[in-house]
């Protein structure tokens, strides 16, 4: 059997408590053979989701602290995320980098803490502005080289390629450009012996482009933002 295609629903701050309850009533529509679904709600929703999620759907957080304990008001640590059932956690999302000042150093610390707590990091990288392929590759190499991923050759990782300019606006890059970058990322992982690393794409994924994206042979999955908060759209995306 082929490896399952991965669908990560990044709900951001778009799904309320009441909507998450509604999700639990329709979640069975997302369960398909050979498709892996990971849902990433806000922190307070994690325990209730963990209790009621279908066995085939996995839970992820959208962020974690780069600290383990201490006077860090508002932070949530990786150990607690593990305790409430998170198997995955997004780190370094471009919204966290640009709106909340998350640095490469913080992302490096978060990745280390997640791995230590048996949570697979979903590490987001991507260029800020539309660039040439070579510029994008240079930018991604710089971002990735700072994250010390070399230390995790034995661990599962997901790298999410999310060009910031393609997020939230319906501006999907050309499929050929995405293909080139995904192949480059697969080569980067091979060169660094990151043999358990998967590569997903994020940025304006919807019902209109999922079929084309799935045709990229080297792509392991997608991370879906706004469309994942519309559950009928999410069901359609996963079923296509
Ligand atoms: P959109 O799907 O809304 O463009 O967001 C993508 C994203 O940020 C996923 O992490």
Image (spheres, rainbow, N blue to C red):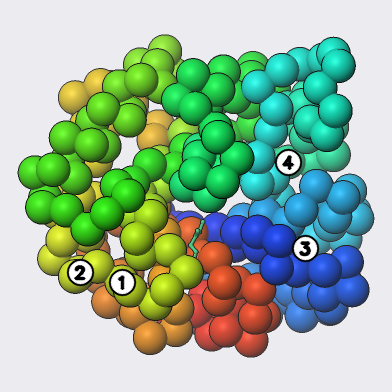
Distance between the Cα atoms at labels 1 and 4? 29 Å
Question: What numbered label is drawn on residue 175?
Answer: 2
Point out the tag, 2 or 3, that comes first from the N-terminus.
Answer: 3
Do callouts 1 and 3 mark residues in contact (Cβ within 8 Å)?
Answer: no
Instruction: Give the crowd class for mark 4: few <14, some 14-19, many >=20 residues within 10 Å.
Output: many
**Looking at this view, is 159 or 147 the one in front?**
147
Q: Secondary structure at mark 1?
A: loop
| Mark 4 or 3: the one toward you | 4
Please state the horizontal and vertical placement of residue 152, each as a whole percent of the image. Answer: 44, 18
Q: Nearer the viewer, mark 1 or mark 2?
A: 1
Q: From the viewer's side, name the closer residue of 14 and 195.
A: 14
Tell me the mark number nearer the camera, choosing from 1 and 3.
1
Residue assigned mark 1:
172
Q: What count of labels does the image hold?
A: 4
Q: Would you name the residue on which mark 3 appears?
A: 54
Separation of residues labelled 1 and 2 (CA atoms)? 8 Å
Q: What is the C-alpha distance between the residues marked 4 and 3? A: 14 Å
Q: Nearer the viewer, mark 2 or mark 3?
A: 2
Q: Which residue is mark 4?
A: 86
- Please give left or right for residue 115 compared with residue 125 in the image: right
User: Which numbered disc flags the more N-terminal residue, 1 or 4?
Assistant: 4
Q: Which residue is at a point 43% across and 63% down the rendered structure image? A: 167
Q: Is residue 231 visible?
A: yes
**184 in relation to 204, above or below:** above
Which corner quadrant holds the N terminus? bottom left
């Amino acid at each position: 059997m082929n490896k399952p295609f991965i669908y990560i629903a990044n709900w951001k701050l778009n799904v309320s408590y009441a909507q998450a309850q509604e999700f639990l009533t329709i979640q069975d529509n997302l369960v398909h053979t050979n498709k892996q679904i990971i849902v990433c709600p806000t922190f307070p929703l994690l325990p209730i989701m963990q209790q009621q999620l279908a066995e085939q759907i996995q839970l992820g957080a959208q962020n974690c602290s780069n600290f383990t304990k201490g006077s860090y008001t508002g932070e949530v640590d990786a150990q607690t995320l593990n305790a409430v059932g998170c198997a995955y956690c997004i780190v370094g999302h471009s919204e966290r980098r640009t709106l909340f000042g998350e640095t490469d150093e913080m992302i490096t610390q978060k990745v280390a803490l997640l791995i230590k707590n048996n949570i697979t990091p979903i590490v987001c990288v991507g260029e800020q502005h539309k660039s040439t392929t070579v510029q994008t590759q240079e930018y991604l190499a710089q971002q990735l080289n700072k994250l010390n991923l070399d230390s995790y050759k034995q661990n599962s990782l997901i790298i999410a390629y999310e060009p910031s300019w393609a997020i939230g606006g319906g501006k999907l890059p050309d499929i050929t450009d995405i293909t080139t970058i995904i192949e480059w990322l697969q080569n980067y992982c091979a060169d660094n012996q990151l043999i358990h690393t998967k590569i997903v794409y994020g940025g304006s994924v919807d019902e209109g482009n999922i079929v084309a994206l799935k045709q990229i042979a080297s792509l392991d999955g997608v991370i879906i933002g706004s469309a994942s908060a519309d559950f009928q759209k999410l069901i359609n995306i996963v079923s296509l």
